[in-house]
Image (tube, helix red, strand yellow):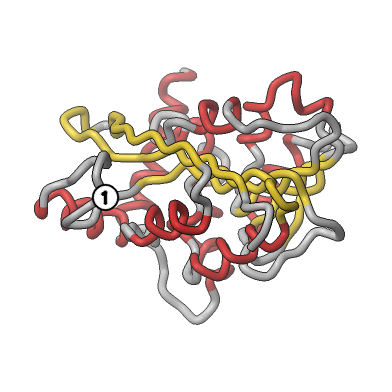
Amino acid sequence: MLRLERLRDDWTILRQMLRGMPRSASHAADLQAFYAPQADGYDRFRARLLHGRAELIESLPLPRDATVVELGGGTGANAEFFGARLESIARLDIVDLCPALLAQARARLAGYRNVEVVSADAATYRPSRPVDCVYFSYSLSMMRDWRAALANALTMLKPHGVLGVVDFYHSGPRPSAGLRRHGPLARAFWRHWFAHDGVRLDPAHLGALRAWLPEHTLREHAAAVPYVPLLRVPYYIFVGRKPLRD
């Protein structure tokens, strides 16, 4: 019976993904229309698709009593990857625009006094004080103005604060030395595959991250896709330090 319920949830999500992300003037309305029907099974399905989240969060070097912001935090599931460290964080703000996913986050994290779930745009939200860490988990590629969101993240960071990103990607035709190169068919396939659901893959993401945060680590991976076992989707994990001086 449980397996049948999970298959039913998966079909709801796959059907919504096949329909694609609506396109309107309001990004918040599009997110709500796309994610509300799949919110209940969202985390279970994404656990098999969104790889590297635990690895990202485990690799974030946080001081005790750290202040942390997740931009595009959705259901708040990523907070659980902090494990026991969540208790030592002074404040974690989970910021998102989608009411259906924010409702899941509030229910999940209601018992944590140090976690605040915030309805706001990642490009304009500002905490009351500079923070120790900002991270994006499969959200930077969904933001219509990703440059503004990334610039805002860097602005809210303390000097030498940490920025973390895990996301899907594809390389440019001539990536920097030492980085993986995806062929033209792979680049076109993944770009169009994800664009249908409002995910905007752009090699400029990694270029901007590496240029703005020269002190960083970068790991490139590929992982399985649910129900499509022959596909391996590229993703990266980036952790960088904001320069002491701009």
Looking at the picture, how far across and down is residue 204, in whole percent? 36, 61
Quadrant in which the C terminus is drawn: bottom right
Is 221 on the left or on the right of 13, as rendered? left
Residue 145 in view, yes or no: yes
**16 on left or right of 116:** left
Quadrant in which residue 40 is drawn: top right
Residue 9 in view of the camera:
no
Q: Between residue 186 and residue 151, name the one nearer to us.
A: 151
Side of 88 relative to 224 (left or right): right
- The picture places residue 3, in percent across and down from the top left corner, at 42, 20
Looking at the image, residue 134 lies above or below residue 204: above
Q: Quadrant of residue 199?
A: bottom left
Q: Residues within 10 Å of mark 1 (few under 14, many from 20)?
A: few
The image shows residue 235 at horizontal and vertical percentages of 35, 40
* Image coords of residue 11 (percent x, y): 36, 39
The one nearer the camera, 17 or 164, is 164
The single residue placed furthest to the bottom in the displayed view is 25
Residue at 68 percent across and 70 percent down: it is: 124
Q: Residue furthest front?
A: 245
Q: Secondary structure at mark 1?
A: loop
Q: Height in image: 81 above or below 242?
A: above
Residue 76 falls in image quadrant: top right
User: What residue is at 39 percent from the left and 53 percent from the top?
Assistant: 206
Reading the image, the residue beneath label 1 is 176
Could you tell me the amino acid type at mark 1?
Ser
